[in-house]
Image: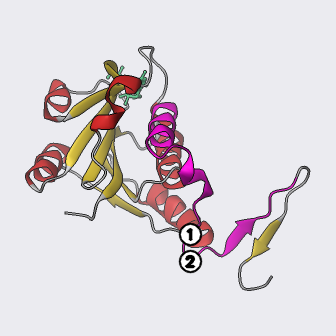
Amino acid sequence: MPEPGIYVLRLSHRRERDKRITTHVMLTARAFGARGVFYSGDEDPKMEEKVRDVVARWGGPFEVRYEPNWLAFMRRWKEGGGFICHLTMYGLHIDDCLSEVPRDRPVLVVVGSEKVPRVVYELADLNVAIGHQPHSEVAALAIFLDRLFSGAELKREFQGAKLKIIPSRRGKRVIRLGEQ
Ligand code: SAM
């Protein structure tokens, strides 16, 4: 079982159809404070490589792992003492349940792509809605993490980064760390 923190499980990745959106789920997970991402569906080494390349240049720590058997994985997560939070428009409004997400246990945030099987709703400790309208797994994940971390994740320093942005009103300033 991983150490306490937030991890994301992206269900039912379809290599051709979802390659951009699953990559965005992963980059959003990393940029918004998750420690790692698991995904099920089609295995996609090229997509994993892209995300690892971002981690190598922009820092981590952040893990990416393919998980062929998501159901067994979710069961093991719970048996090992982890908490599961499923993002779905059918769940409880985030404002009414965010305080139930534990801070001292590993938390798996599950997002779907196509129709999510019923068992996910049952296995989840919490089904959380980011509003009760259909939108996107990327938007849902970003808002969930931003609310959970109260915005602090956007100021985090990434370990081992080779590149860092110097904020500027216009243009792009990027420094190579170690060459300042
Ligand atoms: N039609 C699918 C279903 O009924 O399960 C959902 C498809 S939606 C494009 C993909 C994922 O985005 C969902 O599985 C969920 O994780 C997330 N999502 C979309 N809208 C959401 C909302 N309002 N609140 C929370 N998560 C949402």
Q: Residue 131 carries which label?
A: none
Q: Which of 155 and 177 is in front in this view?
A: 155
The quarter of the picture showing ligand 1? top left
Q: Which of 38 and 114 is in front in this view?
A: 38
The residue under label 2 is which amino acid type? Gly
Question: Which residue is tagged 2?
Answer: 160
How much space separates mark 2 and mark 1, taking CA atoms? 5 Å
The answer to whether residue 93 is above or below residue 154 is: above
Residue 152 showing in the rendered view: yes
Q: Is mark 1 on a helix, strand or loop?
A: loop
Circle 2: is it few (<14), some (14-19), or many (20+) Cα within 10 Å?
some
Residue 11 showing in the rendered view: no
Q: Which residue appears at 91% of the width and 50% of the height?
A: 170
**Residue 105 place in picture, x, y as percent:** 24, 55
Q: Residue 59 carries which label?
A: 1
Which residue is the extreme one toward the front?
99
**Residue 180 place in picture, x, y as percent:** 80, 82
Magenta stretch contains residue 78: no
Q: Quick check: 142 left or right of 175? A: left
Q: Is mark 2 on a helix, strand or loop?
A: loop
Q: What stretch is highlighted in magenta?
A: 139-168
> If you read the primary sequence from the N terminus, does the residue marked by circle 2 or circle 1 appear first?
1
The residue under label 1 is which amino acid type? Gly
Q: Which residue appears at 29% of the width and 60% of the height?
A: 4
Asked if labels 1 and 2 touch by Cβ distance under 8 angstroms, the answer is: yes
